[in-house]
Amino acid sequence: MTKTYKNLINGKWIDAKSGKTFENRNPADWDDILSTFPLSDKTDVDEAVRSARAAFEKWRLVPAPSRGNILRKVGDMMSARKEDLARTMTKEMGKVLLETRGDVQEGIDTAYYAAAEGRRLFGHTVPSELPNKFNMALRMPIGVAGIITPWNFPMAIPTWKIFPALLCGNTVVFKPASDTPETATRLVEILIEAGVPDGVINIVHGGGSAVGTAIVEHPEVDLISFTGSSSVGKKISEAAAKTLKRVSLELGGKNAQIVMDDAKLDLALEGVLWGAFGTTGQRCTATSRLIVHEKVYDKFLSMLAESTKKLRLGDGLNETTDVGPLVNEGQVRTVDQYVKIGIAEGEKILVGGKRAGGDGLAKGWFYEPTILGDVRPQMRVAVEEIFGPVLSVIKVKSIEEAITVANATRYGLSSAVYTQDINNAYQAIRDIKAGITYINAPTIGAEAHMPFGGVKETGNGHREGGWTVYEFFSEWKTVYVDYSGRLQRAQIDT
């Protein structure tokens, strides 16, 4: 029997006011209906926001170390349930168990990091310019946080946002992606079980146009954290500006791996296979472009084509599968359209290039890992985000040209350079316009205790992960304590 889930508002699991629902299906077998969820609208969002607003007045007064203790319990519970959570995620969005286990582990790491931050929400004390006066700056909670997350990392990304938001004393209205609602619900169930009070965490399921828009436009929501496409991020920024909400946007990427002529080619090969085809290419940090020095271009492409053909497509629950399905039919159409665009532009398909069929694949959204050769830097497949298992290969003559090509997109999230020359490495670190640069490692592999985010149209300057995200979810308050017993007029008296 298909399981039915509900929204969580003010500590109660309830249906959408409309009574409407939507199905959650398995992308490896679209006939497999996993569960149903509420198809909510702005009425449900309003109730959730009012719940979060009321709960904020008590939650903000809970000492930060105590809030951290709850998140430590969350980490313990996630650790105990890691395999079950990973299998739920694989069924929902398709990526292989090896990766969904890593997705859950990233959430666990984030929980423990957040727990420690409960005792480290450092402020500043600085000398006053006047006698008998004390100056300090403190971190304060902001209010109700609207959290809107994607389907490709349905555990890790919500924890990047929700855990810091709660630790800083904010309350949350959470809208997960409609492709991965069960993983999100399991996370919220753990938060409640660990002791998060009623109303502090609320989850409202439904589409982005109905639920997401309502959260962004709600006057009682104080800040928005969104991960998704750059086009949607721009709309959110514009809508949130009307009420001057604080907004954090983590958006698209068109990431490049550079392979220089002195690179260890076997290592670079492992990197690009993992970077381009891990998560079936559905990562904002995926390796979408491969920039190769002309001296090793032919050799490396031959190695790459041979290895790519050996990748095994299939259900992510099968431990022998290398590449799972795309998340839905729309994603298949998008990927196939870009491959056709590449052909029309004159690129050569070296591997793949079509939807995968055959035993065990016919009912799912599988697409062959695809390599496009003879790509020029200005072509659409070289500059637009595809979000699928498609790799565009570009030939260059020098590190300077490689960096120029790497920078020739409107995105700037991740980058990678394979070289044994320390001068090349540091030139790339200095000159590549990206928020993340890896040396002799692929474009994917962020660690929970480090800042994550990009430049240009990849975001609006904020960072997730590490210590930096706590800046976004807290407000600075400056405090002056004058114990001189007389009027002191700052710059006038100095």
Image (cartoon, rainbow, N blue to C red):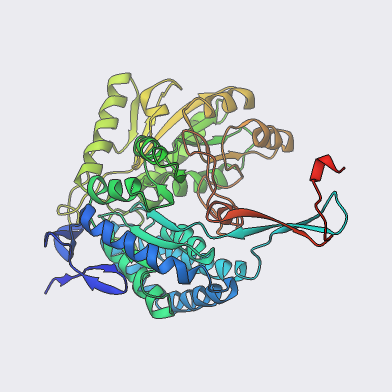
In the depicted view, which residue is nearer to us: 183 or 359? 183
Quarter of the picture containing the N terminus is bottom left
- Note whether residue 319 is visible: no
Above/below status of 186 relative to 366: below
Quarter of the picture containing the C terminus is top right
Task: Give the x, y percent position of residue 195.
Answer: 43, 79
Task: Give the x, y percent position of residue 269.
Answer: 51, 44
Picture residue at 18% right of the left edge, 57% below the top: 39
Picture residue at 45% right of the left edge, 43% below the top: 249
In the depicted view, which residue is nearer to us: 493 or 54? 493
Task: Give the x, y percent position of residue 458.
Answer: 47, 37
Above/below status of 382 relative to 72: above
Picture residue at 46% right of the left edge, 22% below the top: 377
Picture residue at 43% right of the left edge, 20% below the top: 378
> Looking at this rendering, what residue extends furthest in the front direction?
486
Above/below status of 87 relative to 310: below
- Note whether residue 367 is visible: yes
How many numbered discs, if any? 0
- Residue 385 lies left or right of residue 17; in this view the side is right
In the depicted view, which residue is nearer to us: 194 or 347? 194
In the depicted view, which residue is nearer to us: 143 or 145? 143
Task: Give the x, y percent position of residue 437.
Answer: 60, 42
- Residue 73 lies left or right of residue 135; in this view the side is left
